[in-house]
Amino acid sequence: MAFPPGFLDELRSRISLAELIGRRVRLTRRGREYVGLCPFHNEKTPSFCVVEDKGFFHCFGCGAHGDAIGYQMRADNVDFVEAIERLAGLAGLPVPRSTPQERERAQRQKTLLEALEAAAVFYEKRLWSPASGPGRAGLDYLRGRGLDDETIRHFRLGWAPGPEENRDRQALRRALAGEYPEPLLLEAGLLRTSDRGGGNYDYFANRVMFPIGDRAGRVIAFGARTLGDDQPKYLNSPDTPLFEKGRVLYGWAAARANIGRPLSGNGGDPGGHGVIVTEGYMDVIALHRAGFKTAVAPLGTALTETQLQEIWRLSPEPALCFDGDGAGQRAALRALGRALPLLKPGRSLNFVALPAGEDPDSLVRGRGAASFAEALAAARPLAEILWQSELAVRPADTPERRADLKARLERRAREIADADVQREYRRALLDRYYLLSRAGGGLRGVRRDPPTADPPPPLPPGAGRTNREVFLSLLARFPALIDEWIDEVTALDIPEPELDRLRHAILEVAVSHPGLDAERFQQHLGSCGLAGVLGVLNRRVAAHSGFAAGGGDDPDVIRRGAEETLQLLRAQRPGDLEAAERAFAEDASAENWRRLIALKEREAQDGPIGGIDW
């Protein structure tokens, strides 16, 4: 069965090869590649690599090599057609059938590409016409923007004839009419039909032309800038069978080819961000010319979800570099809002702050590549920008405003679909909130959760949970330790919801009422609805931790025991048990309960791993 070439390209582009293979093979990122144990032969040392930006895998041990389709065929022992069908199901693409209509459509797509290529050649020739020719205005403009002839030719910039040479706006139509019928040129977005009954005429006129390429670099559309007073200032091709503005990034193919390469003349990528996302064509071209060859840009609109996915295909934490004015800042916040629900472990955004009134083009032309490299190196992560944006809404200088800030932070964290990332954001944002409140004089009051009945006795804890319980119990009983270790408390990874709620309450009481003795400190925790949890913890700690039980009040003994517990918490890595506890906390299903019980029983038989024998 023959598939249209365009369909196979689209299928490959929608499938992340690293994610596909990562479903069965544990992959570790190393630079531009992912490595792991080969799934096609037995080995102990990884010799299997996945090159995500090039779309292929290779094993240096057994020689296995191929793309997503080849991997699916090998991994599932299926033929080419079945592999296509399975991948299409993952990508959400309907599989085209080899009908006469489909073959005709594939041929038409090829012809559209040929027509657009011919148009690009036409525009290029017009730009490079004799010195007194029609393209002189466009060439002068580009040279005036600091582009040398080599760069202009590399990006295939062109000129669409204006009124003085094309009064009837038929120049491109006449040039291509002999080879391409008008219906095809209309479908390619090169002509438009007059709404006054005047026939078809050139879509672009009197503009500098920027060819827009697909993932393979083939021309599929154009962007155009007027040199006069025509509106809009920038104009893109209309949507066509080959081009959908919200799915395409200017410069994507060139950026993919340069991911991981040193920045020429700038000593490598100082920020380590891979892809640099800018606002416009000239920013991309100027950055490429300055050595930052991984720059891309959306096509005059806010970043779409599809464009964000395309960017993440190239690098996990790209740098967004919008203009240093109010409009650029608003564009950055729109991108943040669009990206927030899509965040995944290891996938985020960084934000570059440019000097006021500058864009990447003006910055590299006016201050040099080193100035842009400095700005890139100072890029801030998405979490920082989210915090600053919410903090800037209004001063957090009253209890009511601080409560509003807290509510907004929690609401933004809940926008994240991935449960692990959402939990980390919520913790990071609320910890910063508590520290801010503490630095600003503290809250006037603490959160009062509705009093609840004592919870039922929880499952016997594993070693990791025991250490977390011991540490939190010590903080509640010896609040003088909190100031000493406040950074450690805010950074604790606590998967159990009730323990994490206790951690937040400990921070909040310490912030709101500094200097409390142990008795009053625990009274405040109890008023937050945590008396039952504290009672269970104190009984457990008495059973597991001799140094903290009963009358163990020697400050040196308590501090030494707390330090040892904290060291264990730093060293522990969440395993199957912690993952099962987290899964049950998020979804108290019978299946998750059975899995948790089984792991608890196994640990009881095998003994605690990595814990202290108190």
Image (cartoon, rainbow, N blue to C red):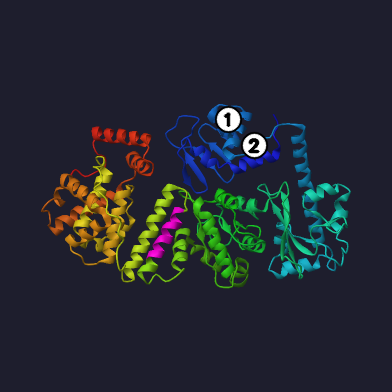
Specify whether residue 321 is in view: no
**How far is disc 2 from disc 1 in space, using C-alphas?**
19 Å
Where does residue 311 sit, x and y in percent of width and height?
57, 52
Please give the range of residues in magenta: 403-414
Task: Choose between 29 and 589: the one closer to the eye.
Answer: 589
C-beta proximity under 8 Å, tags 2 and 1: no
The secondary structure type at the circle numbered 2 is: loop
The residue pinned by badge 1 equals 73
Residue 268 x %, y %: 53, 58
| Three-letter amino acid code at the position of disc 2 | Pro
Q: Determine if residue 126 is in view.
A: yes
Q: Secondary structure at mark 1?
A: helix
Per the image, the residue denoted by label 2 is 94
Residue 266 sits in quarter: bottom right
Which of the image's four quarters has the N terminus?
top right
> Crowding near pointer 1: few (<14 within 10 Å), some, many (20+)?
some
Percent from the top left, x then y, of residue 191? Answer: 81, 54
